[in-house]
Amino acid sequence: MKIAILTSPNQWFIDYAKELAKELSNCELFFDHKKMASNYKIVFILSYHKIIEEEYLKKNEHNIVVHASALPKGKGWSPLFWQVLEGKNDIPFTMFEASCDVDEGSIYMQKILNLDGTELNPLLRHKQAQLVNSMCKEFVSNYEKYNVLTEQIGKESFYKKRTPLNSQLDINKTINEQFNLLRVVDNEEYPAFFYKNDKKYILKIELSE
């Protein structure tokens, strides 16, 4: 079974993509869909930030995405973080067949990521990646079982793209009220911040050992 993993360069998932590529037999890792060979049995498209044109999707038998929501609910950007901000600890993940429309494909499987409500950004990412990789390996190992598509059913909803501005704290609210926001900020890329007396202050959060 010829397999490929497609992910974006210079971002958090790369090490996990490399790990998955090593664990799957006959698997190659790519960072640009236009540079891939053709005729793969399975292409796992994981944390990839470019639109893939139909002509490239048609080259492979399966083009598979894993998205952190119960599709068709929660399409769009950063669904894991938006659900953490909503106070959810049981986060659904959907594996589906990619199409040219955003998060529109038919579903192969769904799993639940169970959080305890204390995880900060690095651990959230780690748990997310572990589940994604586990789902990919399970799909390959049980191909005949999971190679059955189910249409998305229900009313769709969309999450918007998060920006550094979404990391702003409200100085009139307690830390406890804003703890979930502190959980999803990235200390380097988009740290928590607030304004006081026309000055901007940056806060960084980490778990004490």
Image (tube, rainbow, N blue to C red):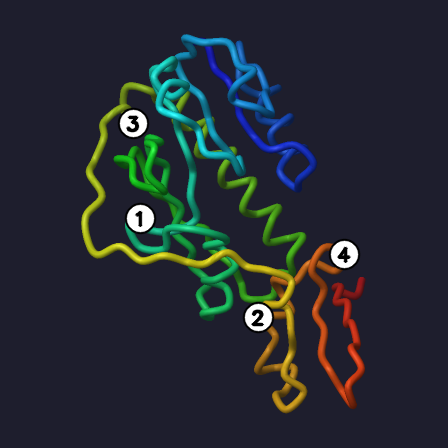
Answer whether labels 4 and 1 touch (C-beta < 8 Å).
no
Which residue is more in the foreground, 136 or 154? 154
CA gap, disc 2 and disc 3:
34 Å
Which residue is more in the foreground, 159 or 177? 159
Q: Position of residue 32 (x, y in %)?
A: 57, 24
Task: Tell me which label, 3 or 1, sits earlier in the chain.
Answer: 1
Element class at badge 4: loop
Answer whether labels 3 and 1 touch (C-beta < 8 Å).
no
Q: Is residue 17 left or right of residue 84?
A: right
- Would you name the residue on which mark 1 appears? 71
As drawn, the label of residue 188 is: 4
CA gap, disc 2 and disc 1:
23 Å
As drawn, the label of residue 156 is: none
- Would you name the residue on which mark 3 appears? 146
- Mark whose residue sits in front, 3 or 1: 1
As drawn, the label of residue 180 is: 2
Mark 4 Cα-neighbour bin, 10 Å: few <14, some 14–19, many ≥20: few
Q: Image quadrant of residue 94?
A: top left
Which residue is more in the foreground, 175 or 139? 175
Going 59% across and 20% down the picture, which residue do you hit? 29
- Mark whose residue sits in front, 3 or 4: 4
Mark 1 Cα-neighbour bin, 10 Å: few <14, some 14–19, many ≥20: many
CA gap, disc 3 and disc 4:
39 Å
- Mark whose residue sits in front, 4 or 2: 4
Residue 25 is at least partly visible in this image: no
Which residue is more in the foreground, 105 or 51? 51
Residue type pointed to by label 4: Glu
Going 55% across and 40% down the picture, which residue do you hit? 130
